[in-house]
């Protein structure tokens, strides 16, 4: 008796005799834990506005099947087929499984807007900074170490106190601290090292205290930018930490730095965070699944539409290439 084939995910496979209109319709998968998230809802809306078919898949419900021959995927027991392009929205808490899912789509021959190697590169703050600094981009002085014997020397390497201390895999401002004295630095380092956490010390850029610039790069363009300012009593400017965003027109040097950073890390869509140094942009972080609610509200731009337009063009280029 032959084993039963898994049913095909509804709406993800073209009919046998497609019409001209049906042939032009594409299925765009959004990998997201929650359909209700602002960015997910906006991406779904942008797909529909362009006459295509959105399909939101909870990353953790994707089942990856491997055997001799072509890899397959099921979602809640239904086989996933007929996908034209994938836009991953991989949260930091599910990075490992999320990368496996993204990689599986690539193995199935489906274009993925941000490849798994680049997502992994961006998630590790030190690794991303290594790539950026090696390529000649300006970054705050940064130190990673496990040597507890000479904290004073580590602080000197990042131009002295105060110093920023960051978890390697923190996100949205979580795991970012500022220390004003050597005993504070020692206590924070000892605490995180004892917990098995990897951290970096980073130069405090005084002229940018409490503010930074977020540029959203899609392809080879910056499609929106804002200056984020921390709320009173807070040094972190993240919107999730209560910061406020104001739309700005980026100077050419900042546009060039943001686009170049995304290219170096290998991301098609990236949120690039920069400090406004005296000599120009200083690259701070790069995010492979940037939220854009604050940016759309600040700029009144259609960031979701820009991402989907690029996803469709990217998939078309892969098909013809």
Image (cartoon, helix red, strand yellow):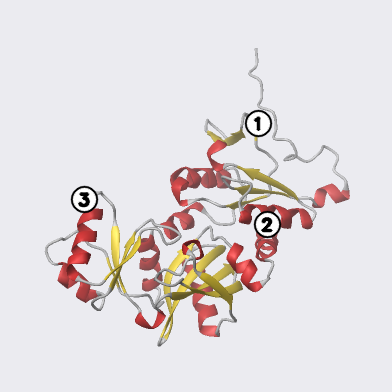
Q: Are marks 3 and 1 in contact (CB under 8 Å)?
A: no
At which x and y percent is residue 124?
A: 39, 58
Give the side of residue 77 with respect to residue 254, left or right: right
At which x and y percent is residue 249?
A: 60, 81
Which mark is drawn over residue 42?
2
Give the side of residue 170 with respect to residue 219, left or right: left
Which tag, 3 or 1, sits closer to the chain's start? 1
Q: Nearer the viewer, mark 1 or mark 2?
A: 2
Determine whether 237 is above or below 74 in the image. below
Q: Find the distance from the CA under tag 3 to the CA under tag 1.
A: 45 Å
Residue at which label 1 appears: 78
Determine whether 188 is above or below 280 in the image. above
Give the side of residue 283 with respect to residue 247, left or right: left
Count of number-bearing discs: 3
Q: For label 1, count other residues whose C-alpha is less than 10 Å away and answer few (under 14), some (14-19) or many (20+).
A: some
Give the side of residue 128 with respect to residue 243, left or right: left
Question: Residue at 22% of width from left, 60% of height from top?
Answer: 189
Q: Residue placed farthest to the bottom in the image?
A: 279
Q: Find the distance from the CA under tag 1 to the CA under tag 2.
A: 26 Å
Q: Nearer the viewer, mark 3 or mark 1?
A: 3
At which x and y percent is residue 65?
A: 54, 32
Q: Find the distance from the CA under tag 3 to the CA under tag 2.
A: 42 Å
Circle 1 — which element? strand
Which mark is drawn over residue 59?
none
Circle 2 — which element? helix
At which x and y percent is residue 195?
A: 25, 49
Residue at which label 3 appears: 194
Q: Residue placed farthest to the left in the image?
A: 149
Query: Image quadrant for the C terminus?
Result: bottom right
Circle 3 — which element? helix
Given residues 103 and 29, the one toward you in this image is 29
Which tag, 1 or 2, sits closer to the chain's start? 2
């Amino acid at each position: 008796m032959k084993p039963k084939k898994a049913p095909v995910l509804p709406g993800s496979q073209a009919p046998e005799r497609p019409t001209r209109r049906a042939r032009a319709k594409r299925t765009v998968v959004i990998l997201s834990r929650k359909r209700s998230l602002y960015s997910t809802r906006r991406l779904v809306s942008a797909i529909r506005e362009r006459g295509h078919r959105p399909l939101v898949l909870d990353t953790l419900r994707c089942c990856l099947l491997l055997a001799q021959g072509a890899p397959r995927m099921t979602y809640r027991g239904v086989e996933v087929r007929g996908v034209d392009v994938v836009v991953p929205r991989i949260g930091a808490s599910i990075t490992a499984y999320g990368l496996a899912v993204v990689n599986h789509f690539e193995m199935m021959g489906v274009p993925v807007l941000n490849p798994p190697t680049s997502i992994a590169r961006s998630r590790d703050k030190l690794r991303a900074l290594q790539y950026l600094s090696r390529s000649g981009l300006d970054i705050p002085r940064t130190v990673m170490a496990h040597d507890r014997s000479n904290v004073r020397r580590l602080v000197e390497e990042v131009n002295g106190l105060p110093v920023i201390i960051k978890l390697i895999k923190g996100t949205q401002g979580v795991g970012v601290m500022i220390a004003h004295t050597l005993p504070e630095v020692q206590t924070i380092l000892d605490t995180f090292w004892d917990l098995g956490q990897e951290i970096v010390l980073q130069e405090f850029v005084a002229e940018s205290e409490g503010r930074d610039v977020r540029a959203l790069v899609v392809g080879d363009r910056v499609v929106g930018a804002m200056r984020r300012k921390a709320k009173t009593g807070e040094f972190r400017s993240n919107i999730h930490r209560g910061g406020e965003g104001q739309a700005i027109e980026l100077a050419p040097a900042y546009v060039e730095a943001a686009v170049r950073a995304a290219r170096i890390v290998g991301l098609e869509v990236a949120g690039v965070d920069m400090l406004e140094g005296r000599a120009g942009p200083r690259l701070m972080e790069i995010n492979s699944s940037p939220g854009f609610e604050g940016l759309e509200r600040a700029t009144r731009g259609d960031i979701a539409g820009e991402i989907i337009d690029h996803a469709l063009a990217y998939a078309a280029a892969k098909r013809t290439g």
